Image (cartoon, rainbow, N blue to C red):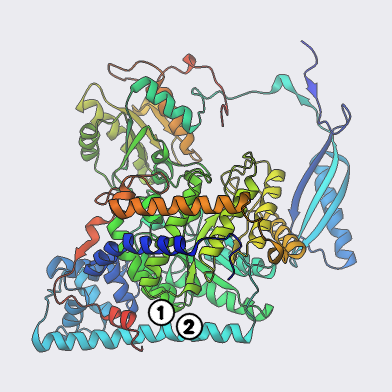
């Protein structure tokens, strides 16, 4: 892609090298540790589903029980499949039930017993990985049988709390033009250290992410995709304490995109930084295999920090997300890096600044399906002014070639959107796309002009911040409040007690498939 | 007193003109359906008190719904003398104003310890108030530079909460209770108040919140403030600034600050 901002390739290269240097120690930490959620995800990929009468999933029971009696330093797989074989259990669910009652004494097997457990675990994982692979193929077939929507994809949110209400709303939104349906999760699900089970009908300002809800919604959207002759993608949210497990369920149920930010949980939900980075790596390995596009959450920084002053923190985070994503096996076309239109409209030249930022991100990541988020912070309740601001957001999006537009609602911050709010929002984006969809090809900022200078300034600030992060270490930078002006120390936050250092001989049967690309 | 009777203003005094928009679950496909839909909208407008209403825009949304924009003349009168304003006992402040008030009055960060007590695992409420992510478009208390938040999460035993509040030097303790079976939220609040009263005469400010509390019950439960459903982080922060940073501190805290000491300035500085 040609650069319209005359960015210096040497500076861009330096920025990437610095991001890699800052991220490398984190990758090493993630490669030498595991978490309870990583181990639970292994069991989910092996087909263990369901929960006890109180709704606590069997994967939690089994992992907790193994941890108490044999430890998780060697992974859950060796002790679990050893007990499965030697205890004569019919399947993992029966084993988990026994474990929940305290009837199973787990051990880390050695010798031939270890080899047997290893082989059984691999066979079980092969089935799950094969299902993920088949889903990826199936997605391609569905797109062939329908059509791939043109970009920018229109991304709409539904969130009633009741999956059976969400389904008709999602289908209606797709008929009205949505290319991507996102089902917002119930408030606080990211802080649950287990994944709820089954179809759910109540949630707080959102619907729980469960395997059954995933399945129901994907099936409904398949039906609508066929009806419309256009493949409608389904998005959910992996970030949180159960990132690896939700990633596994998304792969098993053919979701298409997943929110998976390397730092969102740390900054905005006070989840422990180590836990987050370890979980994130494994979750992204699953997404990579499943052909899922990840969405990152840089837009959130601009809801706490000032969108002009903190513009470079967005770029820095994108570069880190890119590094971690690629290290985990994601391709460029799977990196839905996020950013947002959040500059105070009272700032002079605010639209020029937005254009500069959006074009900078487009040029830094030419092959990434960038996800562009509408204004929220400066939506005041004046719905008429908000509608105008959303139109400018849409215009900036089409002019700078953004890939995924989350459609702004004029009633942002007032209520969950009315049917009419959504309809008006789609009318807005349709008008802009029809009227100015090809404006991007003629949009060449004046050489040396305001937009070019602003973009270069943000890039140089990004390099400066990356240098500091390299000197301090990323965990220290996060502890110092570099992102989203929120301080998160490496040993603080939720979930640190679920982090375990791997012992020699740690065995994760999923990693063998995910890291070596072995067939399912 | 001059006349206190007014009506809406379009472009001429007393014209009463207003604009409303709404959706009805009626189709807008065939000619007959369209006529019926507009008739339905006019009927609603009339029942809402709009004279000679005009449907200026109607649009089908999917097969089953129609969106309308309607103009009309409101037949109702507004009697200004009958307008009552509920006065919050504390002013709503912006984040910057809250920070400034704390810095000025305390000269240090205000410490808030939050928890869900007893068996309650529903951290939604407390997290919406405390997490940076916040709620209803407002950032949580963690966002405030001058507030240090210690969020203990769910199922915290009251004695542990008291001990931690003392260890952290808490200025305020925030407790959220969602579970209400057998009045668990009432008992929880009483237990909380009694434990803090027993622990030290200079107890922190006790603030509880939950959908089933009656905000007028604070004194009878022995706490300083109760927030009900729909409370936003900004309201809690403003209250904390008012209660802890607007007057000299000291001594024991038996009841909430008097409601009469502060003039109300709703929506100030937002």
Residue at far top of view: B1
Residue B201 spot, x, y in % from top left: 23, 21
* Above or below B52: residue B31: below
The quarter in which the N terminus of chain A is drawn is: bottom right
Say which residue label 1 marks.
A289
Asked if both marks, 1 and 2, belong to the same chain, the answer given is: yes
Q: Residues within 10 Å of mark 2 (few under 14, many from 20)?
A: many
Chain of the residue that carries numbered disc 1 in the rendered image = A
Q: Residues within 10 Å of mark 1 (few under 14, many from 20)?
A: many
* Above or below B173: residue B46: below
- Residue drawn at point x = 68 percent, y = 57 percent: A395
Q: Which quadrant of the figure has residue B270? A: top right
Mark with earlier residue (1, 2): 2
Question: Observer-nearest residue: A226 or A264?
Answer: A264
Question: Observer-nearest residue: B67 or A8?
Answer: A8
Question: Observer-nearest residue: A37 or B187?
Answer: A37
In the drawing, does residue B159 fall left or right of residue A265? left
Say which residue label 2 marks.
A136
- Residue drawn at point x = 34 percent, y = 50 percent: A468
Q: Which quadrant of the figure has residue A190? A: bottom left
* Circle 2 SS class: helix
- Residue drawn at point x = 15 percent, y = 65 percent: A68
* Above or below A457: residue B195: above
Residue A240 spot, x, y in % from top left: 37, 59
Residue A138 spot, x, y in % from top left: 51, 85
Looking at the image, do the residues carrying marks 1 and 2 touch, with CB atoms under 8 Å apart?
Answer: yes
Residue A133 spot, x, y in % from top left: 43, 85
- Distance CA(mark 1)–CA(mark 2): 8 Å
């Amino acid at each position: 892609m040609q650069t319209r901002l005359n960015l210096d390739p040497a500076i861009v290269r330096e920025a990437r090298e610095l991001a890699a240097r800052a991220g490398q120690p984190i990758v090493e930490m993630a490669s030498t540790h595991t978490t309870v959620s990583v181990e639970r995800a292994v069991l989910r990929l092996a087909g263990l589903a369901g929960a006890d009468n109180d709704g606590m999933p069997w994967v939690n029971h089994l992992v907790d029980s193994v941890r108490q009696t044999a430890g998780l330093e060697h992974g859950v797989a060796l002790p679990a499949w050893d007990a499965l074989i030697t205890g004569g259990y019919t399947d993992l669910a029966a084993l988990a039930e026994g474990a929940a009652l305290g009837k199973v004494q787990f051990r880390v097997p050695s010798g031939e017993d270890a080899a047997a457990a290893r082989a059984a675990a691999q066979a079980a994982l092969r089935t799950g990985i094969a299902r993920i692979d088949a889903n990826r193929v199936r997605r391609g077939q569905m797109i062939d049988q329908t059509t791939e929507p043109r970009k920018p994809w229109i991304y709409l949110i539904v969130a009633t709390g009741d999956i059976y209400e969400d389904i008709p709303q999602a289908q209606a939104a797709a008929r009205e033009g949505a290319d991507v349906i996102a089902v917002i999760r119930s408030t606080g699900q990211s802080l649950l250290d287990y994944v709820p089970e089954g179809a759910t009908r109540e949630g707080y300002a959102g619907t729980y992410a469960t395997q059954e809800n995933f399945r129901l919604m994907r099936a409904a959207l398949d039906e609508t995709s066929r009806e419309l002759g256009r493949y409608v993608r389904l998005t959910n949210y992996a970030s949180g304490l159960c990132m690896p497990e939700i990633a596994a369920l998304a792969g098993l149920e053919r979701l298409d995109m997943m929110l998976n930010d390397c730092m969102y949980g740390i900054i905005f939900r006070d989840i422990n930084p180590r836990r987050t980075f370890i979980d994130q790596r494994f979750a992204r390995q699953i997404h990579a295999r499943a052909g899922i596009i990840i969405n990152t959450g840089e837009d959130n920084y601009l809801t706490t920090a000032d969108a002009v002053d903190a513009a470079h923190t967005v770029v820095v985070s994108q570069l880190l997300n890119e590094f971690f994503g690629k290290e985990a096996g994601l391709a460029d076309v799977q990196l839905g890096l996020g950013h947002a239109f959040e500059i105070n409209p009272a700032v002079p030249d605010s639209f020029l600044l937005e254009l500069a930022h959006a074009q900078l991100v487009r040029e830094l990541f030419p092959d990434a399906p960038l996800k562009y988020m509408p204004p929220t912070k400066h939506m005041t309740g004046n719905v008429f002014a908000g509608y105008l601001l959303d139109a400018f957001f849409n215009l900036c999006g089409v002019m700078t070639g953004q890939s995924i537009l989350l459609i702004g609602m004029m009633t942002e911050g007032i209520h969950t959107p009315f049917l009419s709010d959504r309809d008006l929002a789609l009318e807005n984006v349709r008008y802009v796309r029809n009227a100015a969809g090809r404006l991007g090809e003629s949009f060449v900022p004046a050489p040396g002009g305001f937009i070019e200078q602003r973009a270069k300034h943000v890039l140089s600030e990004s390099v400066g911040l990356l240098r500091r992060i390299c000197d301090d270490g990323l965990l220290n930078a996060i502890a110092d409040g570099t992102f989203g002006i929120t301080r998160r120390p490496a040993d603080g936050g939720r979930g640190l007690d679920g982090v375990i250092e791997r012992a020699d001989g740690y065995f994760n049967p999923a990693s063998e498939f995910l890291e070596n690309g072995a067939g399912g | 007193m001059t006349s206190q009777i007014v009506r809406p203003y379009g472009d001429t005094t007393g014209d009463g003109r207003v604009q409303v928009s709404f959706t009805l679950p009626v189709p807008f496909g065939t000619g007959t359906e369209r006529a019926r839909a507009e008739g339905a909208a006019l009927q609603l407008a009339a029942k809402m008190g709009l004279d000679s209403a005009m449907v200026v825009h109607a649009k089908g949304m999917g097969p089953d719904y129609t969106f309308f924009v309607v103009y009309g003349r409101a037949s109702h009168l507004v009697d200004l003398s009958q307008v009552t304003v509920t006065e919050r006992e504390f002013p709503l402040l912006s984040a910057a104003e809250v920070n400034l008030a704390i810095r000025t009055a305390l000269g240090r960060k205000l410490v808030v310890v939050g928890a869900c007590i007893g068996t309650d695992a529903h951290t939604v409420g407390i997290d919406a108030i405390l997490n940076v992510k916040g709620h209803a478009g407002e950032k949580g208390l963690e966002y405030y530079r001058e507030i240090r938040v210690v969020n203990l999460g769910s199922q915290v035993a009251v004695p542990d909460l008291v001990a931690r509040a003392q260890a952290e030097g808490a200025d305020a303790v925030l407790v959220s209770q969602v579970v209400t079976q057998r009045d668990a939220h009432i008992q929880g609040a009483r237990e909380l108040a009694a434990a803090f009263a027993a622990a030290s005469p200079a107890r922190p400010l006790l603030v509880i919140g939950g959908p089933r509390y009656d905000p007028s019950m604070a004194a009878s439960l022995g706490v300083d403030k109760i927030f009900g459903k729909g409370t936003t982080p900004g309201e809690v922060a403003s209250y904390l600034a008012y209660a802890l940073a607007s007057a000299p501190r000291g001594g024991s805290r038996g009841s909430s600050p008097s409601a009469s000491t502060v003039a109300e300035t709703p929506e100030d500085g937002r």
